[in-house]
Amino acid sequence: MSQGRSGDQPMLEAEPLHITEQFQHKYNVLIDTDIGDDIDDALALALALRSPEIELRGVTTVFGDTLRRAHLASHLLHVFGREDIPIAAGRQEPLQLRHRPSGVPQAAILDRNEEFSVLSNCSGPELIVQMAMSYPGRLTLLCLGPLTNVALALSIEPRLFMAIRSIIMMGGSSGISLPEWNVRSDARAAQMVLAAGVPVTMVGMNVTMRCQLQEQDIVALRNTHSPQTHLLSQLLAVWQRHRPRWHPSLPYLHDPLAVLALCSPELLQFEEMTARIFVHGPLQGFMIPRVLDGPLVRAAVGVDAEEARARVMQRLLSPLSLQIT
């Protein structure tokens, strides 16, 4: 990948900082998420809030009922004591429709009378532009869903590709081409984002499927008596009831690994490679890495799965937002 801009924070390859240095060099982050169906989005958002390397500046929601997703994200931020973080509901329909957007079953936990005062008046793409221009060269986008909001933001503001420090996306594959959900849900948007000139770190499905919560982790969340772990246990239970029958009952840590790619990059191995996305024909939504011409990405090719799982759990169970391994 390209080297960082002058005065930037350390690149992802850097060795972990000492604790005193970490508080001085936090990453300004905006999370774009399709929270509410698969459980990994909620786990990733909670992990970001529990990671002292991250200063979360905003949350945008994407794909389907984005207002309902924003309400769920707002509730999670409230439980974690971060009502100061703005949330914006983003684009509901993809730029290139391939299948019907997924639902938001985890929003069933919400109280009908709950007020969501932190919701922004601007749209998801507008909030991305606003935050990037407020932190020029210093904002990292953590993209946990289809890339529709980011593609629209790049279209709204031509200078945006220079203002965003980097994009870390959960999606695609660095190995055998697979029709991964986030990319195939809006292949056109993914193609636009990868071609925009922003440095992209990609954590693909071939890597994330190596890392899965264990039964003892579910029990630990259930038995740790805090409002935060109670909420995550609630959402896990809803996800287990509503997941497709062919999905395992223990969740893969797809999106949390994207957070770790920023906070704990030493747990993953990366290679630079091309990533070409097909938007037409029988391969629509497929990403072909390495072998064809395409934009360069910094792609995860391996992970210390056990250590990554332990790191995620340590932070989710921690009662202190500033605790670090």
Image (tube, rainbow, N blue to C red):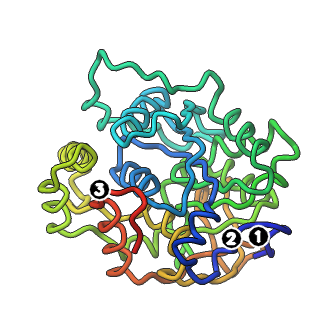
Q: Which structural element holds mark 3?
A: loop
- Report the mark closest to the observer, 3 or 1: 3
Image coordinates for residue 41, horizontal then vertical, percent: 41, 51
Residue 285 to residue 80: above or below: below
Q: Of helix, strand and loop, which one carries label 1?
A: loop
Does residue 4 appear left or right of residue 285 in this picture? right
Q: Rounded to the nearest whole Å, what is the CA distance between mark 2 and mark 1?
A: 5 Å
The x and y percentages for residue 242 are 23, 43
237 relative to 110, above or below: below
Q: Amino acid at mark 3?
A: Pro
Query: Viewer-proximal residue, 37 or 269?
Result: 269
Local packing at callout 2 (Cα closer than 10 Å; few below 14, some 14-19, many 20+) is many
Q: Position of residue 193 (x, y in %)?
A: 72, 54
Task: Examine the rendered structure and indicate whether residue 9 appears above or below residue 221.
Answer: below
In the picture of the structure, the residue carrying the numbered disc 2 is: 275
Quadrant for the N terminus in the image: bottom right
Near-viewer residue (19 or 65) = 19
Return the residue at label 1.
294
Q: Give amino acid for label 2.
A: Ala
Residue at the extreme top of the image, as rendered: 113
Q: Which residue is mark 3?
A: 319
In this view of the protein, can residue 280 be seen by the observer? no
Q: Residue at x 64, y 81 (%)?
A: 14
In this rendering, would 313 be left or right of 290? left
